[in-house]
Image: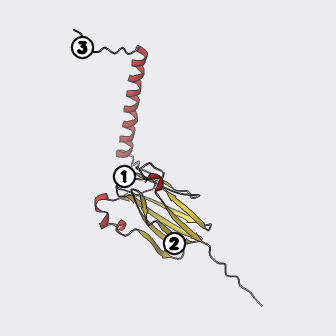
Amino acid sequence: MENQPHIHIDRYERRWIALVTVMLGVFFATLLVGSTFFNVNPSGQGGFVNPNLLEETMFASPGLRHLGENRYEAVILAQTWNFVPAQMTVPEGAEVTFYITSRDVIHGFMIEEHNVNFEVIPGHISQARIHFNEAGTYKMLCHQYCGRLHQAMHADIIVEEVEQTVAVSE
Ligand code: CUA
């Protein structure tokens, strides 16, 4: 009695399977070598943080801080399914340095019409300096699928118009 099913795999199919297996091995090896020896990290690398001890770091109190002149620091915590804080307001022309990490799973971070696009990974701090030169309301969006309410995960940055002081000479 034969109860061992015999699956016939075509000779060429077998070669392709072998080739793909080898390629995946090579890709995995390049990732390992890159991260181990060449310091290849997710974009916007701004350091590391223990995601289980966030209350002992700057992420204990996320928010916007004024650094002077028109410079700000925005510490943002990404979690299922929102960003903390949910809204920030800066004046036109502001230069904002963002520090972002995740408390749980991998999220994404981008700001409409601005040059920033991260994967937000637990344990990593993503950092970017962005100038907001035009007044308006811009969405900060999670663009990495992170679960049931991923599509609801966004926050606003409001850039307020600065009134021009016109010097009038009489
Ligand atoms: Cu967070 Cu999608």
- The three-letter code of the residue at mark 3 reads Asn
* Residue at image mark 1: 105
Which of labels 1 and 3 is toward the front?
A: 3
The crowd level at tag 1 (other Cα within 10 Å; few <14, some 14-19, many 20+) is some
Please report contact status of discs 2 and 1: CB closer than 8 Å, yes or no. Answer: no
Residue at point 44% right, 67% down?
85
* Residue at image mark 3: 3
Which of labels 2 and 1 is toward the front?
A: 1
Residue at point 53% right, 63% down?
130
User: Is the CB–ligand 1 distance for label 1 below 8 Å?
Assistant: yes
| Residue 78 versus residue 29 in the image, above or below | below
Q: Position of residue 133 (x, y in %)?
A: 61, 67
From the viewer's side, name the closer residue of 6 and 110.
6
From the viewer's side, name the closer residue of 103 and 147.
147
- The three-letter code of the residue at mark 1 reads Val
SS assignment at label 3: loop
Q: Is residue 50 visible?
A: no
Of all residues, the one furthest to the left in this rendering is 1
* Residue at image mark 2: 71
Say whether disc 2 or disc 1 marks the residue closer to the N-terminus. Answer: 2
Q: Position of residue 123 (x, y in %)?
A: 34, 55
The mark found on residue 157 in the picture is none
Q: State the CA–CA distance, disc 1 to disc 3.
A: 45 Å
SS assignment at label 2: strand
- The three-letter code of the residue at mark 2 reads Arg
| Residue 81 versus residue 56 in the image, above or below | above
Please report contact status of discs 1 and 3: CB closer than 8 Å, yes or no. Answer: no
Q: Quadrant of the N terminus?
A: top left
Q: Position of residue 40 (x, y in %)?
A: 41, 48
